[in-house]
Image: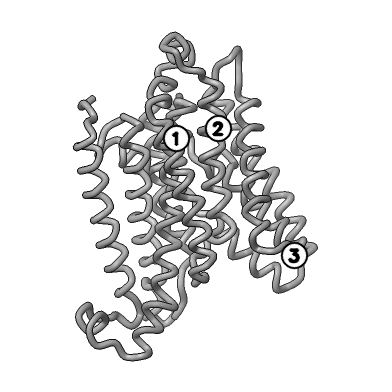
Amino acid sequence: MKTLTLRRWMGLNALLAALAVAVALAASLAGESPLPFFTAWKDWAPEQKDILWVSRLPRVLLAALAGMALGSSGTAFQGLLRNALADPYILGVSSGAALGSILGLALKLPFAAVPVLAFATSIAAMLLVYRASMRSGRIAPHTLLLTGVILNAFLFAFILILNGLASFEQSQKILFLLIGNLETETYARIGCVAAIVVAGLVLLTAEGRALNLLTAGPETAQALGTDPDRHRRRIFFAASLMVGAVVPLAGLIGFIGLFVPHIARWTVGPDHRISIPASAWIGAMLLIVCDTIARTLLVSTAFQTELPVGAVTALVGAPFFLILMKKRGGS
């Protein structure tokens, strides 16, 4: 592991941030009606302004935030649970947040209350999976994944019941939540989500050193003066907070939290002090690219439709998951 100096940390983050901004800019200009860069920024027509500022930029920003939240929380869960297959979607955290969001929708709660409910249900789901998979003070990997799968099925049953009781309009919103939806949101709502995601990311990054010690085992961490339970609580809180913030707007988007941590470790190494922020930048870029593919791939064909972004991430992520399972020999 390379020594992580402040200069290297800042350099890597600056490089990844610059790449993310470039990807976001390119995605904002791409679409059914491409916006030439110089025309868009120097000689805007009113319709080009609307396309850029009202339609595409909010969607790109929401994709970036969702990618940051899912990528960094996936890295935190994989480090904390010492399992390379752990991610918010598989563990049921995203489904828990979706159930809270749909409950808020069914109860017609104000928007500000929905992320709070989503956070509560996501952290409850995470704690349930965590407790159920403990064996003699250790996480059992098979039990962890199996519990996550079972919990997902259980939560989806509740979601389907709520969907059956919902009105047609609510049912459409529930469907969008289940398949992942990054359609245009207001800047005010995106700003609220951004504040929560940034706060959670700062907290997770601050826990990077403790997470490095916990990866070596709770006994080792305790022997080196770290309180494992206190740091676990902080990491669960921060990761669930971010997932609970983005799911009410972006819906269920699978696999970003699974493969982004692996890309981050290959790119910057296993040190969580840098791999967590790197996962956030890489997750933002990947989800922006997936969403750009989803909204442009079929729109100019005879189908003239957009794909759900969750379908694109699943097409990429499911084969990756199978390859990873095969490499690990099911362990």
Counting residues from the N terminus, which is met first, the one under dot 2 or under dot 3? 3
Q: Which residue is mark 1?
A: 76
Specify whether 288 is left or right of 134. Answer: left
* Residue 123 position in % (x across, y down): 62, 39
* Residue 160 position in % (x across, y down): 72, 56
| Label 2 crowd bin: few (<14), some (14–19), many (20+), radius 10 Å | many
Where is the N terminus found, in terms of image quarters? top left
* Cα separation between marks 2 and 3: 33 Å
| Label 3 crowd bin: few (<14), some (14–19), many (20+), radius 10 Å | few
Counting residues from the N terminus, which is met first, the one under dot 1 or under dot 2? 1
Q: Which mark is residue 145?
A: 2
Q: Which residue is mark 3?
A: 108
* Cα separation between marks 1 and 3: 33 Å
SS assignment at label 2? helix
* Cα separation between marks 1 and 2: 16 Å
**Which label sits in the foreground, 1 or 2?**
1
* Residue 231 position in % (x across, y down): 51, 26
